Image (cartoon, coloured by chain):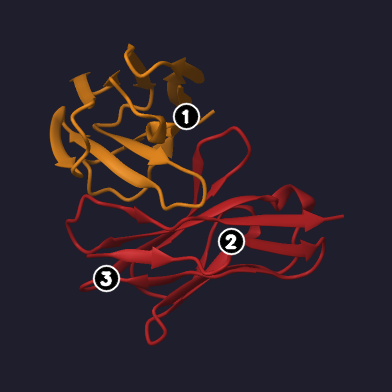
Amino acid sequence: ETGVTQTPRHLVMGMTNKKSLKCEQHLGHNAMYWYKQSAKKPLELMFVYSLEERVENNSVPSRFSPECPNSSHLFLHLHTLQPEDSALYLCASSQGGATNEKLFFGSGTQLSVL
Amino acid sequence: AQSVAQPEDQVNVAEGNPLTVKCTYSVSGNPYLFWYVQYPNRGLQFLLKYITGDNLVKGSYGFEAEFNKSQTSFHLKKPSALVSDSALYFCAVRAFPNDYKLSFGAGTTVTVRA
């Protein structure tokens, strides 16, 4: 295991639902990330938190709302999603601030939007 | 803007044969270059990185990568592939020195047949 745990592993939701993805890291890192992985596309960086402050937001639609209550936990709140949002959502963490290059990834949440 | 290209969606090799996974990059300034591997139903795992110094970088599981500045390439290699090397491989780049964003390619699926 990488020390980064994501729950749930799978999630099916309707377009009107509200759900949250959870990520927890047990590595003592101080930066956390959300990436979106779609088949045959580059991984898309969605959000970066360094020392619990958001430092990167790549023009992600407002239906995705991140929350980082402390350096060990990261959430992605979802509401009124679209079918094209179906993807694998990966959480990652790193040590030494967001400029450190080595990321540790969780196994992801496979999201299906109906 | 920074980006990487992985020109091959799929690479197939026989066990025991050399394995090469290609990557080219585009970045302003000096690049930080990385390879990650994703096994089925798992998150990405760090394989190796190039920051500066020797153009040939050695990493985990017998993999190595060669940095070629003139060709803006960073190909991943393994002299003798194993069936267990079958996975999805991602190349990534970050612009030195303080860019938070780690940009990934679309990935190359490697299949090693027995």
Q: List the residue tagged with mark 3.
A: B27
Q: Position of residue A108 (x, y in %)?
A: 47, 29
Q: Residues within 10 Å of mark 1 (few under 14, many from 20)?
A: many
- Circle 3 marks a residue in which chain? B
What is the spatial separation of the Cα atoms under label 1 and label 3, in whole angstroms?
A: 28 Å
The circle on residue A108 is 1
What is the spatial separation of the Cα atoms under label 3 and label 2, in whole angstroms?
A: 22 Å
Tag 2 secondary structure: loop
First in sequence: mark 3 vs mark 2: 2
Foreground pick, B89 / A29: B89
Quarter location, residue B99 = bottom left
Chain corresponding to orange in the figure: A
Tell me which amino acid carries mark 1: Gly
Q: List the residue tagged with mark 2.
A: B9
Q: Residues within 10 Å of mark 2 (few under 14, many from 20)?
A: some
- Circle 1 marks a residue in which chain? A
**Contact check, label 1 and label 3, Cβ < 8 Å:** no
Chain corresponding to red in the figure: B
Foreground pick, B65 / A114: A114
What is the spatial separation of the Cα atoms under label 2 and label 1, in whole angstroms?
A: 22 Å
Q: Position of residue A7 (x, y in %)?
A: 44, 17
Quarter location, residue B59 = bottom right
The answer to whether one can see residue A28 in this image is yes
Residue at image position (20%, 44%) is: A58
**Number of the front mark, 2 or 1:** 2
Tag 3 secondary structure: loop
Tell me which amino acid carries mark 2: Asp
Quarter of the image that includes the N terminus of chain B: bottom left
Q: Position of residue B95 (x, y in %)?
A: 24, 63
Q: Work out whether disc 3 and disc 2 sit on a shared chain.
A: yes
- Circle 2 marks a residue in which chain? B
